[in-house]
Amino acid sequence: MTDSNNFAKDIVEAPAKALEKTIETIIKDEKKIASKKPFRKTREYFDVLGPGLITGAADDDPSGIATYSQTGAQYGFQFIWLSLFTYPFMAIVQEMCARIGIVTGQGLAANIRHNYPKKILYFVTSLLFLANTLNIAADLGVMAASVKLLVPGINFIFCVSAIAFIILLLQIFTTYAQYSKILKYLTLALLSYVFTAFAVHLNWGEVLSRTFMPHISGLNRDQVFLLCAILGTTISPYLFFWQTSQEVEEQILIGETTVKSRRQNVTKTELKNMRKDTWSGMFFSNLIMFFIIAACAGTLFSNGITNIITADQAAEAIRPFGGDLTFFFFAIGIIGTGFLAIPTMAGSSAYAISESFGWKQGLYLKLKKAYAFYGIIIISMIIATIANYAHLDPIKGLIYSAVANGCVAPVVLFFIVKLSSDRKIMGEHKNHRFITASGWFTTIMMTLIGIAVLATIL
């Protein structure tokens, strides 16, 4: 009888136990899925990032790092609020550029050529080529100097040549799909400045206070020039041409090989992802500016070391306060950002000039199908390398570059706002009134900056 009762009990309890095990399995699976969800969302977010992230990170080139380092070393936290101030204007301009590329299926220079007098375009692209080449020359020099800090015995000229040669090989002989991934991962080099800022033990209460509650006193000539340099290196013409053309390259990568097909296949999801990419990229760019100024203000300015001119000098000067690891992070950041920014500058010149004359262009093309496009990149790199052989003063190079950019930026911004606000060109994707108003404000601001740069130099 007992065996019969046990048997009956097992029959009754078996489904309940099975159900209990099933529920436990489901809970475990749900927990696994939940634990993986943040990682999946992070991966999906990173997959969306592309031209915007690369453009934003490329803005923090070695010359930009030098400017931010000078700002922190000479004036402490006085101008750190600019990292917050420039963000929305930079993001709005780059979003307009990206939208022009996606909606029209063509780069910025091509759109200007089709809708406005070509003579103005030729003038602008000539100045852009000059400014970018001078900037590339200065960046190559700073990168080589940073390598010498890490490897003291290396020859400077050899280092400049090797860096230029590697960049050219990657830009010319890798596919666009491969190259865009390389550039995307190079953006991680900028995180070295976040590590640097935390390694030097800053007073974060003071840092945040000066960021959100700026104190502006009377500006002297040097401060005006530095202010112009910060805004000029943040909202820079080469970024306008680069991102517009990169959005087109992304469309070509997924099979939209004609202008017509690119115009017909614009989706709301594509524009939404573009905005996420662009605003994230510009946030990243300004965040790095914030950390560089903070690190140099909290160490160099606090200890009376204000004579910082180049980025490699900043790396060496910060060493006694942050140690060898901090020095290493700063120097590696300079080299990594150079490998990201230099091809962006050379590429933007090639896009702008090739589109101006209607030549075949694009990193998706092989060298033999776009000789003129790649020829512009090669010529720019050769001139920049030779300038270092001739011991170009990097500061003079950057000053001349700033003047050229000061002349180019307002003109190009005028075209960007006009193009992105035109219903005939952009259709339903034209600017909202707020975006247009912000664009015109930025154009006026950059015009005043250009005038101020000329006034401080002449």
Image (cartoon, rainbow, N blue to C red):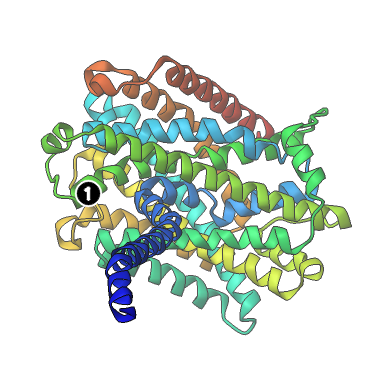
Residue 206 in which image quadrant = top right
The front one of 61 and 432 is 432
Find residue 369 and report its horizontal and vertical position in percent: 14, 57
The residue located at (19%, 55%) in the rendering is: 370
The residue located at (63%, 68%) in the rendering is: 329
Is 22 rendered above or below residue 239? below
Quadrant of the frame with the C terminus:
top right
The front one of 205 and 395 is 205
Q: Residue furthest right?
A: 303
Quadrant of the frame with the N terminus:
bottom left
Specify whether 17 is left or right of 391.
left
Specify whether 5 is left or right of 232.
left
Q: Is residue 436 visible?
A: yes
Residue 315 in which image quadrant = bottom right
> Secondary structure under badge 1?
loop
Three-letter residue code for mark 1:
Gln
Find residue 446 and report its horizontal and vertical position in percent: 55, 28
Query: Which residue carries the number 1 mark?
Result: 361
The residue located at (41%, 30%) in the rendering is: 412
The residue located at (36%, 52%) in the rendering is: 44
The front one of 112 and 417 is 417
Is 347 rendered above or below residue 405? below
Find residue 79 and report its horizontal and vertical position in percent: 73, 39
The front one of 363 and 135 is 363
Is 114 rendered above or below residue 313? above
